[in-house]
Image (tube, grey):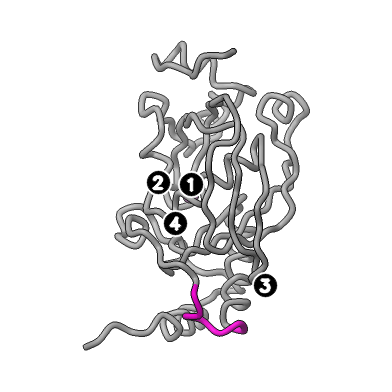
Amino acid sequence: MPPMPLSEHVEALLTTADSGRLPIVAAGDPVLRRPAEPVDGQLSDGLLARLVEAMRVTMHAAPGVGLAAPQVGVGLRLAVIEDAATVVEEVRAARGRVPQPFRVLVNPSYEDAGERQVAFYEGCLSVPGYQAVVARHERVRLRALDERGRAVDEEFDGWPARIVQHETDHLNGTLYLDRAELRSLSSTQTRAALERWAQPTPRLAAAELGFALPAAD
Ligand code: NI
């Protein structure tokens, strides 16, 4: 049997939505490990808009600050990001956790646009129950299209830069764990576990768990 065209797959997927939410694919599913196909007319404008809306609702419900199409089982280079950044001031200052309005990233790619790497705990909706420290570029240049096909060429820094890198990596079949300091891997399954490394920076975790952080300049 020939594979189902992507548009039929997406139509069928959208009928499974529960209060607008799609099921999130977990690590171990090959769709998270395959490079996603560039968005190039596989879906009609209307179907693409419905998929984006379902991804937005799914991201909010999770809750998360980004969601890539492979995480709902669709192998397209498409992601949504949004972060209300409701964190205390010292966390905001240390992590550059500023609000990121809702954005749709179509066919995104990024490159390093700064001098520094910064390391913080992050997690992924497809790897529930864990977090780990990942060193990432502090600033990146994003090239993409928006949901109307207009070119985007923009620099991001702080936490939004981290979100852009994490979501774009998903479209290349890369999970944050591939880049993580594995000795930092921590459970988030209980409140106590979650709060253990809730400090603004992972400095204490690095000392206690025995891993290195990027050199500060
Ligand atoms: Ni993720």
- Measure the alpha-carbon separation of dots 3 and 4: 19 Å
- Measure the alpha-carbon separation of dots 3 and 2: 28 Å
Query: Could you tell me residue 118's position as x and y percent?
Result: 56, 26
Residue that badge 1 annotates: 124
Mark 1 within 8 Å of ligand 1, using the beta carbon: yes
For residue 210, side relative to residue 166 (left or right): left
**Range shown magenta:** 40-46
Residue that badge 2 annotates: 175
Q: Given contact means CB atoms under 8 Å apart, are the residues at marks 1 and 2 in contact? A: yes
- Residue 148 tag number: 3
- Measure the alpha-carbon separation of dots 4 and 2: 9 Å
Residue that badge 4 annotates: 171
Q: Nearer the viewer, residue 25 or 37?
A: 37
- Indicate the secondary structure of the residue bearing disc 4: helix
- Residue 70 tag number: none
Which label lies toward us, 3 or 4? 3
Dot 1 alpha-carbon crowd within 10 angstroms: few under 14, some 14 to 19, many 20 or more: many
Q: Earlier in the sequence, mark 4 or mark 1?
A: 1
Which label lies toward us, 3 or 2? 3
Type of the residue with mark 1: Cys
